[in-house]
Amino acid sequence: MKATGKDYDFLIVGSGLYGATFAHMATKAGKKCLVIDKRKHKGGNVYCTDIDGINVHTYGAHIFHTNDQHIWDFVNSFVPFNRFTNSPVSISKGKLYNLPFNMNTFYQLWNVTTPEQAKKKIEAQTAAHQYAQPANLEEQALKLVGDDVYNTLIKEYTEKQWGKKASELPAFIIKRLPLRFTFDNNYFTDKYQGIPIGGYNLLVDGLLEGIEVKLEQDFFTDRDYYFSIAEKIVYTGPIDAFYNNCFGALEYRSLEFKHEVLPQENFQGNAVVNYNDATVPYTRIIEHKHFEFGTQAHTVITYEYPKTWKPGMESYYPINDEMNMRRFKEYETLANNETNVIFGGRMAEYRYYDMHQVIGSALAKTGRLFPDLSL
């Protein structure tokens, strides 16, 4: 039951994984919640569109992975996850390479068959690039993996993704590049990995079951009203927008997705295929049926195009360079002084989150607010 004098204990702005998890746990603690979202659907960027019986990841590939058994058990309590393993491949100059960089990749590059041979190749190529302090992404990558891996599988793809020369990008973007000296194409090393059977909408619906949700509601059109009906606001939108961009807009990299239904059973044989070459305008093609081992006679593919972000566009990857982080710290100082607003999630915290991390963040916050509540 609601314990305050207002209509709701919590108004949650945004129905993505942070907002939905927070609302679920707060409701479990006996709090009355209202979730609003400006979109026509729940779920934020994990939302799936059913296209001819195939669950299409509307906003790009979302593959759940975690080492945290509690989080894995938590999400599986709403919908069972399948055994999907992410094993992407990359096409460079007409040749296909396995990702992540492993013995299959090294064989494809150099025809080496043993870890010792591969290590010697990499050591020989990185020897000339041992910069004490790499000045940019290019120097950092060359220091870590050498010329062949960098020029074949990193340089052009990264420059497409970020819209800048690798020599102009900060080194911290690739603090490390894992090299695996085994014939293992599993992209993630986490213990648990999979896709919800039936799509992510089932996970979000489970989290929000029994909770009032209003769609196509813009918090900023009547923020005074929303503050008046709830004791606390849980805000998951852009932190700069909350403060009317008073310190300037935080920058992001955006994406555009083009979906196609094809009258064939199998287009590329894999869920994710990267296209490394600068001459190809998209960074990857996603074939959604492979996420759930589909056997339909048709298929749905999505071309993913990186885009220069402008205000009003979807914000995907925060550009955490020095200027933006300095600006974010100013907003964060304001946020830390709020007494009735909780900021959480990718845009409110201006950081890239994997799905398990954003759920974990919401669980940690509700755990502090409701210490007697268990998963």
Image (cartoon, grey):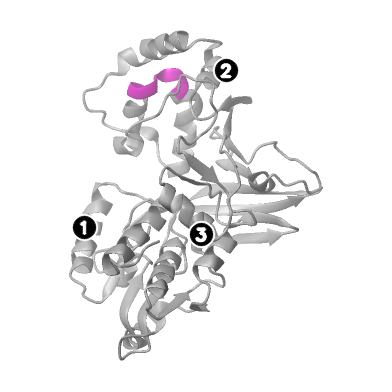
Q: Position of residue 354 (x, y in %)?
A: 42, 49
**Local crowd size for mark 3, using a 10 Å CA cut-off: few (<14), some (14–19), many (≥20):** some
Residue 218 vs 101, above or below: the answer is below
CA–CA distance between discs 3 and 1? 25 Å
123 magenta-colored: no
Q: Quadrant of residue 279?
A: top right
Proximity of marks 3 and 1: CB atoms separated by less than 8 Å: no
Rendered residue at 70%/36% (across/down)? 269
Query: Residue 267: horizontal and vertical position, in percent?
Result: 73, 40
Residue type at numbered disc 2? Gln
The residue indicated by pointer 3 is: 45
The residue most toward the bottom is 5
The amino acid sitting under disc 1 is Lys
SS at mark 1 in the image: helix
Q: Magenta residues?
A: 142-149
Q: Residue at x 45, y 38 (%)?
A: 190
Quick check: 135 left or right of 313?
left
* Quadrant in the rendering for residue 244: bottom left
Instruction: Find disc 1 in the rendering and name its residue.
Output: 329
Quarter that holds the C terminus: bottom left
- At horizontal 65% and vertical 57% (from top left) the residue drawn is 198
Give the vertical position of 16 relative to 137 (above or below): below
Query: In terms of sequence position, does the residue under pointer 3 or pointer 2 come before the other?
Result: 3
Disc 1 crowd rating (10 Å Cα; few below 14, some 14-19, many 20+) is few
Label 2 Cα crowd, 10 Å radius (few <14 / some 14-19 / many 20+): some
Residue 271's tag is none
Residue pointed to by mark 2: 108
Give percent across and percent down for residue 303. Answer: 62, 47
Is the N terminus in the top left, top right, bottom left or bottom right quadrant?
bottom left
Q: Residue 56: horizontal and vertical position, in percent?
A: 64, 55
Foreground residue among 127 and 289:
289
Q: Which is more N-terminal, label 1 or label 3?
A: 3
